[in-house]
Amino acid sequence: MVDLKRIGRARKRIGDVVLRTPFAYAPILSELSGYEVYLKKENLQRTGSFKLRGAFNKIATLVEEGRKNGVVAASAGNHAQGVAFAARHFGIDGTIVMPEFTPLTKVMGVRELGAEVILHGSNYDEAYAYAVAYAEEHGKDFVHPFADEEVMAGQGTIMLEMLEEQPDLDAVVIPVGGGGLISGCAVAAKSLSPEMDVIGVSAAGAPAMKQSFDAGRPIDSTSVRTIADGIAVRDTSPVTLEYLLKYVDEMELVGEDEIASAILFLLERQKLTVEGAGSVGVAALLHGHLDLPKGSRVGILLSGGNIDVTMLSLIIEKGLVKSYRKMKLVVTLIDKPGALERFAGLMREVQANIVQIGYDRTSTDLEFGDAHVSVALETKGQEHQEQVRQVLREHGFPFREEH
């Protein structure tokens, strides 16, 4: 079993390689929530995720035991990079099996760390099954992303750092996918501060661990769908569930819009790039899923920052629309000289900046002699957008809004 001594040994193994990431007071989140909030910034870890801790500790123990035939892992992201980094550090072969749909940037990132990449299967579960069989066939050691005690012990070193800096924490909020991170952290938390609340947060699109926690037995999901790909785990691990049932006080779910708003909040207000999985704790805080006494000292773990730039761009775009800072309209004009100039002049008058524009005179829903102008406007809030609508109505411009 994982205990405080095992976590302590893990800390010694990883100490010269893994960064001690900042655990900093977050004044804006504190003011918004009424809690005293601190953020543990594992998004700033080497390889961009906490996963390096567990992977490095596991591979270090294998090397200590003289097992140097190489390691195999299945992952489409952070665990892959952690295993590849550790394998290169110890000079052993690393093989990562990744699903065939894995973005090229992630594949190249693992290869740049020196590991061999095998693309197999249409999803993680198929890649996982192939990786286990591959490791057995080639006499290599399989490094599980969460259901392994040395991996869990490595992740638990995060909690040691947090409590050294803030020993009086009342609660800690931790992302949950497969459960390896919260298992290690919860053991350390309850060993050093038994009264502390340990709260896990999963994505509503990957609810297996939450449902299993509530039922007290493993329940697998039929499918998962979430932007928090780092915690998009379909099946519950009986190994980690045992630790959750023993050491975790509470499990919460957050929705996709809540995760997206937390990513945008962290980027804009905290100047931190955090992936979906890493932001679920902040999502729970911002959207009222935490029920703690006012003034509680709360530590929130930002588990990683490896977000796909295309996804980040989409989240920013949608976030601007939802926060009334961007407005998308399709306006119908008479297709004649000066009409577009007149429309643009009205936008200038209400100080709405046109950032994108398109002109369509051929759509079948148009009357002959009309044109559609699709525009994206920078706006200054809900009241400003109402001013835009009002001036268009006053000057006889039919329009519809796009969301």
Image (cartoon, rainbow, N blue to C red):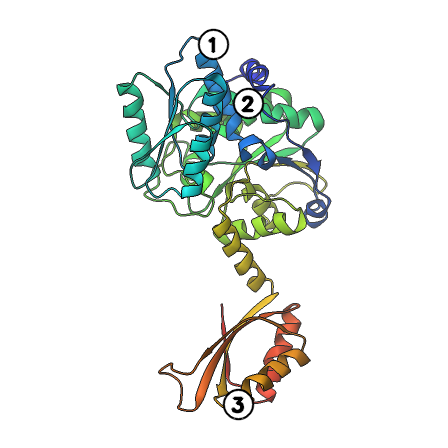
- Kind of residue at badge 1: Glu
Identify the secondary structure beneath mark 2. helix
Q: Which of marks 2 and 1 is in front?
A: 1
Image side of residue 267 versus residue 114, left or right: right
Q: Which residue is drawn at 55% across and 40% down?
A: 305
Q: Residue at x 55, y 84 (%)?
A: 340
Determine whether label 3 and label 2 are within 8 Å by CB: no
- Viewer-proximal residue, 12 or 100? 100
Residue 139 visible in image: yes
Quote the CA–CA distance across marks 2 and 1. Answer: 24 Å
* Residue 394, position as x, y percentages in the image: 60, 88
Q: Which residue is drawn at 44% across and 39% down?
A: 106
Q: Which mark is residue 187?
A: 2
* Residue 341, position as x, y percentages in the image: 58, 84
Image side of residue 184 versus residue 34, left or right: left
- Viewer-proximal residue, 296 or 353? 353
Q: Mark 1 points at which residue?
A: 64
Identify the secondary structure beneath mark 3. loop
- Kind of residue at badge 3: Pro
Q: Which residue is drawn at 56% across and 64% down?
A: 321
Q: Residues within 10 Å of mark 2 (few under 14, many from 20)?
A: many
| Picture quadrant where residue 366 is located | bottom left
Q: Name the residue under label 3.
A: 337
- Kind of residue at badge 2: Val
